[in-house]
Image (cartoon, helix red, strand yellow):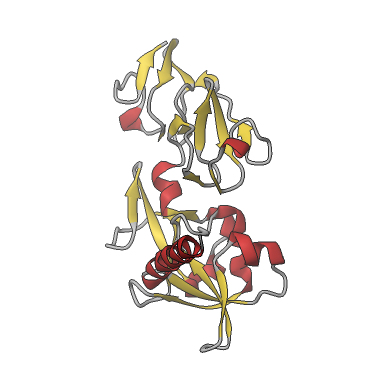
Amino acid sequence: MKALISLLFLLTSLTINAQRSTGIELEVIIDSISENIIDTILDIEYSSKEGYYILWVHEKEYKPFTEEYFDILNNTESCFNRSTETDHLNLYIEYDDTLTDIDIYENGYVYKNMKFSSLDTVNNDKLKTKKKISTYLDVTDWILDEYVIFDEIRTETGINYSCIKAHKTKETNKPPDSKYWTIKTTTTKDWVLDEDLIVGDIRIVLSISYKCIKAHKAKEDNKPPDTKYWELY
């Protein structure tokens, strides 16, 4: 039993170190952060070498840094991105500019990789993780042992639920557990530009109703009757 515990501890340590090796270090002031967040939710650790606490920014399974905790950025002092050797946060904001190799193009938009030194020019609630830009509108079935983040949508017994707290899925936290999920209702109304749409939404164009079959942001080049995104309803 001790050998198994030691092996699990070693595997966890290797996973953590692998994520941190290409992660982002934020010098964080923990005075206003709850002990529960420090101990169990976010990847925060005191560095005796540096003499301050480090918040590790990453999106993978071990304590990902997700949207509901972005206010903590207001309590940070410096940033180092180990992958780019810059102060890029790998957090993104919709931006009207040319695309660089560290930015993201999705749904007709450029998402700018924000620098720590530019954080004071934007509102934290405008920032998005890479995973959220790419997948948060997707509607897939709820499954066990998956890490879901804030605003991701999962279907259980034919009902769409939106995640309200990042977690790893277990039988004890599956929808409709109100601690982790809220019902995501589909809507019926006229089609409009720049709206985030999910599977099941009904939109009307020229008095014809269409059902969304693939989550997307509404653009002129994907409006009904585009069969990649819509079917007659």
Front residue of this view, candidates 127 and 195: 127
Residue at image position (37%, 67%) is: 18
Q: Is residue 84 above or below residue 193?
A: below
Report the label total: 0
Rendered image quadrant of residue 188: top right
In front of the other: 157 or 95: 157
Q: Is residue 226 left or right of residue 197?
A: left
In the orientation shown, which residue stands out farthest toward the front? 1
- 98 left or right, relative to 161: left
- Vertical placement of 72 versus 192: above or below? below
Q: Determine the residue located farthest toward the left in the rendered image.
A: 101
Residue at image coords 64%, 66%: 39
Q: Position of residue 118 (x, y in %)?
A: 49, 71
In terms of depth relative to the viewer, which is nearer, 206 or 33?
33
Q: Where does the image place residue 29, in percent across and percent down from the top left?
A: 64, 77
Residue 59, image x and y in percent? 45, 57
